[in-house]
Amino acid sequence: MGGDAWIRKRIKAALRGDISAYGDLVHLSQSGLRGFIAMLGTPPHAVENIAADTFVLAYKKLNMYDPDRSFSDWLRGIARNVVEQWREKRRPGTANGERIAAHLMSGEIRDVVLKEEEKYRTGNLCRCLDKLPARSRRMLDLKYSDRKTSSEIAGELELETAAARLALFRVRLKLRDCIDKLAVAQEAG
């Protein structure tokens, strides 16, 4: 189960209205798709909803699927777009970590008087950013200050696109862990 021929048969059946055939495709793909969505740096609480949205959108666009292309690659392309849309919806007016990092790297937020809690978070972020290797800071700067895509970052840093995505994911995890450790130390001390 799960070979190319089997997948093509399930897609044809789904296009004829067989919902259980599409369910088979979802069952086959869901674990890998969730992992991919998480690898894009999506918060754990959002992965399941984004995966579900991806499968719904893929079902609606199933007639556009090119059978010469890998089904999982096609799904990942849709998921990448769904993740970007999810992030865009949360950007305006929020003070999430990505926006704080982008503003910090551009120097805009340093002059703003922040609430006490935001001062700690921002200070912790600055300390953690300072601990990163120059290449990691450059990667974050390209992503959040220059608003480059993973492909563009890969080109500038002479990496494969998948390697750039994975490196960004790992850098974000490092930052999150560092900030969490500093916050725990501040609460204890």
Image: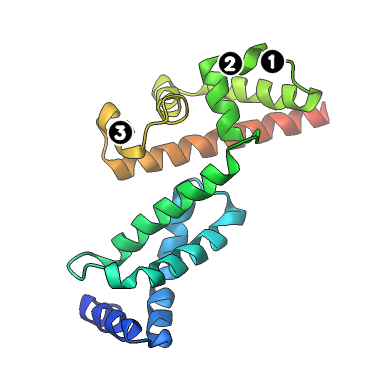
The numbered mark, 2 or 3, whose residue comes first in the sequence reads: 2
Q: CA distance from mark 3 to mark 1?
A: 31 Å
Q: Residue at x 49, y 45 (%)?
A: 41
Q: CA distance from mark 1 to mark 2?
A: 8 Å
Can you identify the residue that label 2 sits on? Answer: 108
Q: Decide: marks 2, 3 in contact (CB < 8 A)?
A: no
Can you identify the residue that label 1 sits on? Answer: 112
Q: Is 159 left or right of 96, judged from the image as shown? A: left
Q: CA distance from mark 2 to mark 3?
A: 24 Å
Quarter of the image holding residue 166? top left
Rendered location of residue 179, percent (x, y): 64, 31
Amino acid type at mark 1: Val
Tell which of 110 and 60 is nearer to you: 60
Q: Residue at x 29, y 73 (%)?
A: 63
What element does badge 3 sit on? helix
Q: Residue at x 29, y 41 (%)?
A: 161
Rendered location of residue 86, percent (x, y): 53, 50
- Pick out the residue farthest to the top: 111
Can you identify the residue that label 3 sits on? Answer: 152
